[in-house]
Image: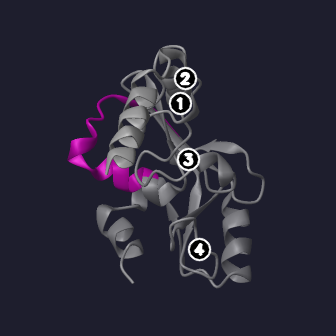
Amino acid sequence: MKPFFYLGYWLLLAGACQSPASSDQARQDHPSAAGPTKGQEENYDCRHCGMPSDEFPEWQASLVANGQTYWFCSPRCMFLFRQNPKSGLTAVSRLEVSDYYERKKIEAQKAYFVRGGDVPGPMGPDLVPHATRAAAEDFMKEHQGKEILTFAQITPEIIQKLTQP
C-alpha cells in the first residue's frame, strides 16, 4: 500500500512543479475554440463543429463579425453558426466561401451554390460554392446536383434539410 501512496505523492508533486512556460506552450499548441488570444496565431478550427477548416481548402468558409474572423470547415457550418441566436454575431461585415474548383475565396453573396449531388462536404451533405453560374451548372451536371441557389435563396429550412439523413 505504501508504494502506491509514494507513487501518487511523486506524481502529484511532479504535476505541481510543472513550469508555467510548458502550460503556456500547451495553450499555444491547442488554441481555444473561441479564436485567437493575444499573442497567438489565428485559430482555423470550425466555429460550429470544431474540425480544422484549413484541412478542407475546397470547402473552407469564413465570416468577419464583431471585429473578429470566424473560420468554418464548410458553407453548411457557416450558415448553421450564423443562424444560431447563441452565436452572438452582430454586424457581420464579410462572408467568404471557397470556389470548389479554383479554391479561391469569393464573396458568399456573389457565389452560386449547388445543393445535392454525389460530393459530400466535411460534415456530410453541403452546398458546393462556385464563382460563376457556368461553373455551378457544370458541377451540377457532373455530380448529379439537384439545384443551383444564390446566397439570397438559402433559407434556414434548406440548411436544416442538409443536416437530416
Which badge, 2 or 4, is on the more N-terminal residue?
2
Which residues lie in the magenta part? 78-95
Mark 4, other Cα within 10 Å: few <14 / some 14–19 / many ≥20: few
Q: Nearer the viewer, mark 3 or mark 1?
A: 1
Which residue is rendered at x = 69% and y = 59% of the image? 100
Residue 40 falls in which quadrant of the image? top right
Quickly name the residue at label 1: 26
Crowding near pointer 1: few (<14 within 10 Å), some, many (20+)? Answer: few
Q: In this image, 50 relative to 145: left or right?
A: left
C-alpha distance separating marks 1 and 4: 34 Å
Secondary structure under badge 4?
A: loop
- Residue 95 in the image: state x and y as whole percent: 50, 40
Residue at (54%, 78%) from the top-left corner?
116
**87 inside magenta stretch:** yes
Badge 4 amino acid: Pro
The quarter in which the C terminus is drawn is: bottom left
Tag 2–tag 1 contact (CB < 8 Å): yes
SS at mark 1 in the image: helix
Q: Give the residue at mark 3.
A: 61
Whichever of labels 2 and 3 marks the residue nearer the N terminus, that label is: 2
The amino acid type, in three-letter code, at marker 1 is Ala
CA distance for labels 3 and 4: 15 Å
Labels 3 and 4: the sequence-earlier one: 3
Identify the residue shown where x is 42% and y is 42%: 7
**Residue 3 in picture, x, y percent from top left:** 39, 46
Mark 2 and mark 4: span between their CA atoms?
40 Å
- The residue labelled by disc 2 is 22
Q: What is the three-letter code of the residue carrying label 2? A: Ser
Is residue 30 at least partly visible in the picture? Answer: yes
Question: Element type at marker 2?
Answer: helix
* The disc label shown at residue 120, or none: 4
